[in-house]
Image (cartoon, helix red, strand yellow):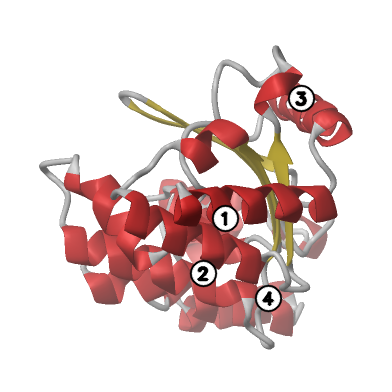
């Protein structure tokens, strides 16, 4: 916008009463600008963009998770909030978007430094987008059968969790598939990962990986493409949605009779 108007960084900074470095940080996204400054810049550049005004307003609003005392600091919650679709492979536990309250609490009880109430509320709030009409999130989960067999929270909590999976599998926004144990080796044995897509097709896919000491956030094309290839391979060998539901139902039945 600035360059199209014929302004250099120096002339624009002087006209906006900003230092050259301050204006550069705003243009590169390092520093947030308020709506008043953006309108002034548009007047200077003789170019009005209402979409940019809306984006600036949105960027200055506190995210939903701030109400729970969480500072995401550029982490996963903010990215998932902006995403329109998530593909996830989960190896050892039920994916967070599909967990019941009891399962969440049992899972986080093992983490001594975790605020249990906060963790449960945030995960349950995230799940609302799966049934949202105004801002839906579509979701494809490939879950290793091992996660279905691990009794997190004991038999009662796990039965409730498996019943919940049968319910959410019916949602139009959810595609749930199981990777059977008898498959043997596969390309995702190293661990779980998520691929997030966004409403704007120009936005690159986003790779998110949790590991024992932290998380990996990546938009590098080579890494994202490799992860997409792995997910596609998993889709080719996982049970289809109907067979996956049948397996979960069978496991639920065996827990009741066992």
Q: Earlier in the sequence, mark 3 or mark 1?
A: 3
- Mark 1 neighbour class, 10 Å CA radius: few under 14, some 14 to 19, many 20 or more: few
Secondary-structure class at tag 4: loop
- Mark 2 neighbour class, 10 Å CA radius: few under 14, some 14 to 19, many 20 or more: some
- Of 93 and 40, the residue lying toward us: 93
The residue located at (72%, 27%) in the rendering is 227
Q: Earlier in the sequence, mark 2 or mark 3?
A: 2
Q: Is residue 55 visible?
A: yes
The residue sitting at the top extreme is 185
Q: Is residue 99 visible?
A: no
Secondary-structure class at tag 1: helix
The residue located at (23%, 65%) in the rendering is 118
Return the residue at label 1: 253
The label shown at residue 136 is: 4
- Is 204 drawn above or below residue 218 in the view shown? below
Q: Earlier in the sequence, mark 2 or mark 4?
A: 2
- Of 225 and 257, the residue lying toward us: 257
């Amino acid at each position: 916008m600035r360059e199209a108007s014929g302004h250099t960084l120096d002339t624009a900074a002087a006209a906006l009463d900003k230092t050259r470095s301050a204006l550069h940080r705003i243009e590169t996204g390092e520093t947030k600008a308020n709506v008043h400054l953006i309108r002034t810049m548009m007047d200077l550049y003789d170019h009005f963009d209402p979409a940019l005004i809306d984006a600036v307003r949105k960027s200055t609003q506190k995210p939903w998770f701030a109400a729970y005392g969480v500072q995401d600091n550029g982490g996963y919650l903010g990215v998932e909030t902006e995403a329109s679709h998530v593909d996830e492979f989960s190896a050892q536990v039920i994916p967070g978007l599909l967990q019941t309250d009891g399962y969440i609490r049992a899972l986080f009880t093992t983490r001594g430094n975790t605020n249990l109430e906060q963790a449960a509320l945030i995960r349950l709030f995230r799940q609302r987008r799966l049934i949202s009409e105004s801002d839906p999130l579509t979701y494809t989960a490939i879950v290793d059968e091992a996660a279905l067999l691990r009794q997190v929270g004991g038999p009662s909590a796990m039965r409730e969790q498996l019943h919940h999976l049968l319910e959410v599998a019916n949602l139009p926004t959810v595609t749930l598939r199981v990777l059977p144990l008898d498959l043997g080796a596969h390309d995702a044995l190293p661990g779980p990962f998520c691929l997030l897509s966004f409403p704007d097709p120009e936005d690159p896919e986003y790779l998110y990986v949790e590991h024992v000491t932290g998380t990996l956030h990546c938009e590098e094309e080579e890494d994202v493409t490799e992860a997409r290839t792995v997910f596609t391979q998993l889709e080719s060998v996982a049970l289809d949605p109907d067979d996956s539901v049948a397996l979960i139902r069978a496991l639920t039945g065996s827990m009741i009779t066992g």
